[in-house]
Image (spheres, helix red, strand yellow):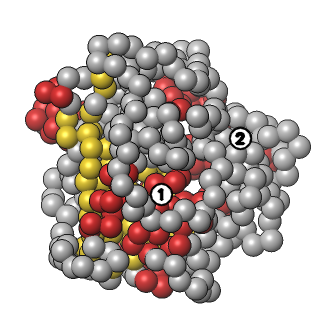
Amino acid sequence: MTRMRLERRTVLAAGLAAATAALAGCRDRVRTGQPTPEATSPAARATTGAPRAAVAPSTAAAPAPQDKIGRRDPQDGSALTTVLTRYLQPTRENPDHPMYAGAVALCQVGGAVVARSVVGKALRYDAGPVLLPESKQVAMRHDSIFDLASITKVYTAILALQQVDRGRIDLAGRVVDYLPEFSGTGKDAVTVSMLLTHTSGLPVGAKVTGLPDDAARRAAVLATPLVAGAVPGTVFRYSSVGLMVLAQLVEKVTGSRLDQVLKSELTGPLGLRDTGFNPKTWLSATDQANRLVATDARSSRGLLRGVVHDDVANHLGGIAGHAGIFSTAADVAVIGQLLLNGGSYNGTRILSEEITRRMLTNANTGLPAVDPERPNRTSAHGLGVVLDQPWFMGWLASPRTFGHTGFTGTSLVVNPARKMVLVLLTNRAHPNWSWADPDPVRVAAANAVGGPVKRAA
């Protein structure tokens, strides 16, 4: 059985081939009506803090790229479907459970859809977890709405870089000069760019439980100390706290809450009507029933569906810089295309070409990386995006390939040389995140649409 660590994800080799094997019989060990003990227990999951009301995303429809599905080539949707279907049941990489209940994938080349696939269920289990009767399960759809988890960081980065474009934020500026509450030993050396490149020395998570209100929780984020012995700017250490702090900085310079900035500066102008925080506040009852994708079904919080999976984001009212955005594959693909286009999409400019180039350029050249879960990863990282990581990009990885992953089983990969955007959204945390590591299917999907090629600079 694959044993998951209690933080982000475990190490997987990058050379997984695209799945073509015949489907094996399902060995899902959850029996209808019977709760299943947790395979591993994560750190204490507390109940939600008082939520802040969310801002509904734009109601303007996003321009849909031309759908060219049906071509018989390596990017034909059948290749993705073969891959995604394989992982609906136990595999050699994950022999005790299916990797997920369902998944959606979308691949674009040159802005046109060349492949897409949808498999499985958006909802399969009730709290317990208990396997639901087939009649109560909800099928996955191309427009299903997922908890993006850490892909939220890309959106926060874009919102911050807009303020750099406008002269309100200096990437070389000290964070404490914008947020005086960002105090503690060594933290006066942390710059804004270090938050974006994960070189600040801040830890992965913040302690926000047991505090009386949202103000206290936000203050606790800013007061989070550096990792013992950390020297800002010298080592890559993945840190969700850095993006939590960056979100507060964006709120400070704009005078608006993060969800409001998201709507007014990004999703609204791009017409991304299916993207936003706290989707139960802006989705109709029908869409909540048919389109929301479930995550955890055995935590102390019960079945999570339309509620952010990340505990810290949940305590912050579902609105945070590191996690909390929900979206569809089509809407996520627009973000990838936006960056691939140099900061504009369908005539709407969101970022300048200059800041977009900086965002997609490795800012950590020569720096070591410290990641206990992936000891072989490199520090390659732009301003809010991951660069050149075969452990989830597979054969699409190259020095210019960028993207991000999310703990709930989501990923975005963009290969500029191929003009390719690949979005893979799975609900691997449903019903239990510890059942599976999503990296094998991420690599297999990338390999299915990418094929083996010589790495280019």
In the picture as drawn, the residue positioned furthest to the right comes out as: 229
Label 2 crowd bin: few (<14), some (14–19), many (20+), radius 10 Å: some
Task: Please determine whether, in this image, residue 70 is positioned above or below residue 212.
Answer: below
Task: Please determine whether, in this image, residue 118 is positioned above or below residue 209.
Answer: below
| Front in this rendered view, residue 114 or 120 | 120
Whole-percent x, y for residue 36 in the image = 43, 17
User: Left of 370 or right of it: where is 318?
Assistant: left
Quadrant of image for the C terminus: bottom right
Whole-percent x, y for residue 349 in the image = 35, 75
Labels 1 and 2 touching (C-beta < 8 A): no
Query: In terms of image quadrants, where is residue 455?
Result: bottom right
User: Left of 255 or right of it: where is 366?
Assistant: right
| Mark number, residue 442 | 1
Quadrant of image for the N terminus: top right
Q: Residue at x 15, y 61 (%)?
A: 61
Q: Is residue 139 visible?
A: yes
| Residue at the spot of label 2 | 203
Q: Secondary structure at mark 1?
A: helix
Residue type at mark 2 is Pro
Q: Residue at x 74, y 58 (%)?
A: 376
Label 1 crowd bin: few (<14), some (14–19), many (20+), radius 10 Å: many
| Mark number, residue 274 | none
Per the model, the C-alpha gap separating discs 1 and 2 is 26 Å
- Ranked by sequence position, the earlier of labels 1 and 2 is 2
